[in-house]
Image (tube, rainbow, N blue to C red):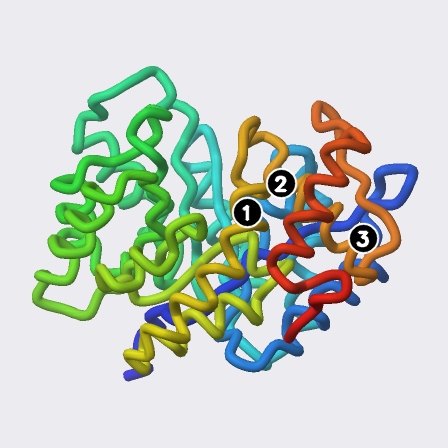
């Protein structure tokens, strides 16, 4: 029996470049994938999530995005593919397509049906994931949102999902609440089988990893995967002096990327790649808009503060 893949370590969620015409820029995207893959310590890549602006891609473009990703990444690292759909059967169809294409794992985003408010009846959440699980043999990651967004799942619901659907092997925890985050980690690590909690809390990454997170799944890894690897290795090696030093480098740029409005988080990351000379353009599709010069300068200062740009540039 093939051992089930359980994601851990540093997993960047990549970005998607566009041409001035707002078509997918395949050449620039392949270059971006190679840049991220070149970072020693990256354990997997996530595609077709929020960071690749799938909200603005039609079905054919989403398929092309995945095909390009799998072709460029090959067997270098596992490819985690985001799946979503307003209806569970739509998400299930996306899961089948991802498996046929060659993805290694699925990141399941919540249906917008859950936007009507909390609490979500656990049975509805379980049904959504069961329908997807019946359509694919791939392992699945739950995308856990902040509870205030109405897309979050209660800790008890996360535990039920893990207990009742064996294909669910991990959660991407973006609960944005340190108390709830630690509660989720403790509860899910108490299961009778291996289960991975992947943090997305780059603004307080050191605290999250010390709580026991099993890895980092974040769009910011598309810009500074090296810093995430350094932090991960320092905490795993119990080198707190090193971890604290990396934290000081991460904070200036994390505070820029994750500032309000959050709709521009990945927009800012695209501009960062331009400032770093890794991409020529930072086009986004409406309703996103080009950032102001003042905002781009703020990104520049964050990169300088992180030692990634300017006279203080470091590895």
The image quarter in which residue 122 lies: top left
175 to the left or right of 32? left
- Mark 3 or mark 1: which is in front? 3
- Mark 3 or mark 2: which is in front? 3
**Label 3 with label 1: CB-CB less than 8 Å:** no
| Residue sitting at x 31%, y 40% | 175
- Separation of residues labelled 2 and 1 (CA atoms): 6 Å
Image spot of residue 154 (x, y percent): 19, 36
- Does the image show residue 68? no
First in residue order: circle 3 vs circle 1: 1
Question: Dot 2 corresponds to which residue?
Answer: 54
| Residue sitting at x 59%, y 41% | 256
| Residue sitting at x 30%, y 56% | 208
Residue 201 vs 114, above or below: the answer is below
Q: Nearer the viewer, residue 127 or 172?
A: 172
137 to the left or right of 210? right
Q: Nearer the viewer, residue 15 or 138?
A: 15
- Separation of residues labelled 3 and 1 (CA atoms): 21 Å
The image quarter in which residue 109 lies: top left
**Label 2 with label 1: CB-CB less than 8 Å:** yes
Instruction: Give the SS element for disc 3.
Output: helix
- Separation of residues labelled 3 and 2 (CA atoms): 21 Å
Seen as rendered, the residue at the extreme front is 311
Question: Residue 274 got which mark?
Answer: 3
Question: Residue 49 got which mark?
Answer: 1
């Amino acid at each position: 029996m093939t051992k089930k893949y359980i994601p851990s370590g540093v997993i960047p969620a990549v970005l998607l470049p566009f041409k001035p015409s707002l078509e997918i820029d395949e050449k620039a995207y392949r270059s971006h994938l190679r840049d991220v893959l070149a970072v020693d310590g990256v354990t997997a890549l996530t595609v077709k999530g929020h960071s690749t602006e799938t909200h603005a891609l039609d079905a054919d473009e989403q398929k092309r995005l995945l095909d390009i990703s799998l072709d460029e990444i090959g067997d270098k690292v596992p490819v985690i593919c985001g799946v979503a759909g307003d209806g569970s059967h739509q998400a299930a169809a996306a899961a089948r397509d991802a498996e046929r294409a060659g993805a290694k794992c699925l990141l399941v985003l919540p249906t917008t049906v859950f936007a009507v408010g909390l609490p979500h009846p656990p049975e509805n959440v379980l049904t959504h994931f069961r329908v997807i699980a019946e359509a694919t043999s791939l392992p699945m990651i739950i995308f856990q949102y902040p509870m205030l967004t109405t897309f979050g799942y209660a800790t008890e619901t996360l535990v039920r999902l893990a207990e009742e659907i064996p294909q669910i092997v991990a959660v991407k925890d973006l609960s944005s609440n340190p108390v709830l985050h630690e509660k989720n980690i403790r509860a899910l690590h108490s299961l009778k089988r291996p289960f991975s909690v992947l943090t997305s809390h780059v603004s307080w990454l050191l605290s999250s990893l010390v709580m026991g997170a099993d890895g980092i799944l974040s769009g910011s890894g598309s810009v500074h995967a090296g810093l995430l690897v350094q932090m991960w290795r320092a905490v795993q090696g119990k080198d707190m002096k090193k971890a604290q030093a990396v934290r000081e480098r991460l904070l200036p740029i994390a505070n820029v990327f994750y500032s309000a409005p959050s709709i521009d988080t990945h927009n800012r990351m695209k501009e960062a790649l331009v400032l770093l000379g890794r991409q020529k353009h930072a086009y986004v599709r409406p309703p996103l808009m080009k950032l102001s010069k003042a905002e781009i300068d703020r990104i520049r200062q964050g990169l300088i503060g992180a030692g990634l740009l300017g006279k203080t540039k470091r590895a």
